[in-house]
Amino acid sequence: MTKATKIVIGAIAAVLVLGFGGTWLYINVIKEDAPERLSLDDDSGLSSTTTVAEGSETAETTVAPGDGASASDGIDGEWTATGDSVVGYRAKEVLFGQDTEGVGRTSSVTGTLTISGTSVDTAKFEVDMTTLKSDQDRRDGQVRGRIMETEKYPTSAFELTSPIDLGSIPADGTEITAKATGNLTIKAETKEVTLDLAAKKDGNTISVLTEYRIQFEEWGIEDPSFGPAQVEDNALLEIKLVFEKA
């Protein structure tokens, strides 16, 4: 082996070591941990723990016993999504062999729901996909560009296609679970999905929490992997909607 060849091999090895070592240092020491999954009890919507179990087998709405009389006061009518709503994604990544998570979120959410007695008759919301933000500008550029093409498809949306029967009106602070069936639109695709919900009324607000696993290929989403960053073929869609009486 010539001296020049040894130098080249040594340089390549050094680059690989520095790349791997630098990545390990960044992910495990410098980089902040990804925010926890959203929670009904978290006010910020940016760092919390989940109360919705992925793949939940909830079959019907369940309501804990409570004094429903006071909770029903003023519940009928239209409710409007507030700036406390948060929608985003969570995807597992491998960067130079190091496991990490990419999480992007936005509060640019608009929507309404209408309630009549113990029935949620209508519900819909839209998300401004151009405002999704993570901890990495490079990731955000990829998401807005080739992955989600937000200039062409700036919004994602969900609209309820059948009413949700609550069974009875829960007392304030009582968490309930339910299923919501509706049309979910992401990028170029619209599909009917069923979402497992957790919800809670607290005074003049109603908070709704759900998650849904998105398989990229099924939704016309290009493989997010690029360069040394390899991404799984799916991401967790995280949704927390906070409504106030209109």
Image (spheres, rainbow, N blue to C red):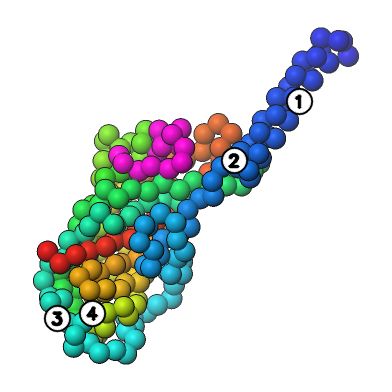
- On screen, residue 183 above or below 140: below
Label 2, label 3: how far apart the Cα atoms are: 50 Å
Q: Which residues are magenta?
A: 130-143
Q: Amino acid type of disc 2?
A: Ile
In front: mark 1 or mark 2? 2
Regarding residue 179, the answer to whether it shows in the image is no
Q: Earlier in the sequence, mark 3 or mark 1?
A: 1
Are the two marked residues, 4 and 3, in contact with CB atoms closer than 8 angstroms?
A: no
Q: Position of residue 233 (x, y in %)?
A: 50, 48
Q: Earlier in the sequence, mark 2 or mark 3?
A: 2
The residue labelled by disc 3 is 73
In front: mark 3 or mark 1? 3
The residue labelled by disc 4 is 165
Residue drawn at (26%, 45%) of the image: 128
Q: Position of residue 76 (x, y in %)?
A: 12, 75
Q: Quarter holding the N terminus?
A: top right
Q: Is residue 218 left or right of residue 156?
A: right
Q: Earlier in the sequence, mark 2 or mark 4?
A: 2
Image quadrant in which you'd find residue 140: top left
Label 2, label 4: how far apart the Cα atoms are: 48 Å
Q: Amino acid type of disc 4?
A: Asp
Mark 2 lies on a secondary structure that is helix
The residue labelled by disc 2 is 30
Q: Nearer the viewer, residue 52 or 200?
A: 200
**Can residue 71 be found in the magenta stretch?**
no
The residue labelled by disc 1 is 13
